[in-house]
Image (spheres, rainbow, N blue to C red):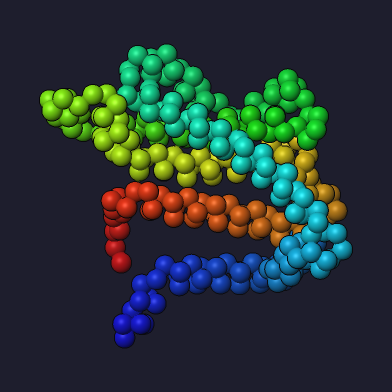
Amino acid sequence: MSLVRRVLDSSALYRLIALAIFATIWQLATLSHKSMLIPTFTDTMAAIPKLLIPGYSGDESAKLWDALYQSNGALLIGFAISVALGVPFGLLIGRFRTIERFANLYISILLVTPMAAVIPLLVMSLGVRDGAMPTRVILIVLFAIVMLIVNSRAGIRQIDPSLIEMARCFGAGELSIWRRILLPGSLPAIMTGVRLGLGRAITGMVIIELLFIAVGLGNLIQKYDAQLDGARLYALIIIVVFEALVLIQAVRWLERRVTPWRKTTSFGR
């Protein structure tokens, strides 16, 4: 009975059930609709190994891996820059009100500005030569960095001020306060910002390549769409979503490792 209870309590079981329901509805709907543009679930699943496995379907897998290399290269550089700049800046404006007074307007602009409107401006300014790597990196930074800044600032703000006052009463300096109170206390919020920023970075990567700079994954999506190759198009989108989920789960694992004291609250069974 304990094994059955563990299986029933596992979230993986409910995810598999939800996936099975979704796949069944997809398959039945496409079979009844018989659209050339929307492939069946089975056709889409059959196209995934053709794209991923080298030599399985001509040079399609080589094109996919090359696209992944180009897109993920810009994603990695842009997200690394976002973390390197966004986290320290968010901590500083959370700690020092004077810096926040200068920066608050620009943070608000980043929060409310639709990034799709900024893309053509940067494309015209920086150009699209050599795969437009600088343009794509800058745009990914703009998509992701605001989440890191806001969450890092929130991490500092949620720390009880009495802890800082107590540390000062015992003779702690600013560096010691950062090391013993501010950084450990804000780390859960920082990791949340990293996770949200990564999701925004992936979204930005696809939007940039799909709408304005036809390289990498965006180029393949446009190609399969123009060829009305629904199976490969949907398979490619599933591969991108799966990659995003793997990256998000990797950040969740890292979050649990670096903040083992953080407890999550679950409502209901």
Considering the image in quadrants, where does the N terminus appear?
bottom left
Q: Position of residue 22 (x, y in %)?
A: 57, 67
Q: Is residue 109 above or below residue 37?
A: above
Considering the image in quadrants, where does the C terminus appear?
bottom left
Q: Position of residue 254 (x, y in %)?
A: 44, 51
* Quadrant in the rendering for residue 116: top right
Q: Is residue 162 above or below residue 221?
A: above
What residue appears at the point 30 percent right and 50 percent down from the top-left corner? 262
Query: Is residue 15 shown left or right of residue 183?
Result: right
Query: Is residue 84 shown left or right of residue 90?
Result: right
Q: Position of residue 197 (x, y in %)?
A: 51, 39
What residue appears at the point 36 percent right and 72 percent down from the top-left corner? 9
Q: Position of residue 94 (x, y in %)?
A: 34, 25
Q: Is residue 76 above or below residue 17?
A: above
Residue 229 in sight from this viewpoint: no
What residue appears at the point 65 percent right and 58 percent down from the top-left corner? 238
Q: Nearer the viewer, residue 183 or 199?
A: 183
Q: Is residue 12 above or below residue 124?
A: below
Query: Is residue 154 shown left or right of residue 58?
Result: left
What residue appears at the point 50 percent right and 72 percent down from the top-left corner? 17
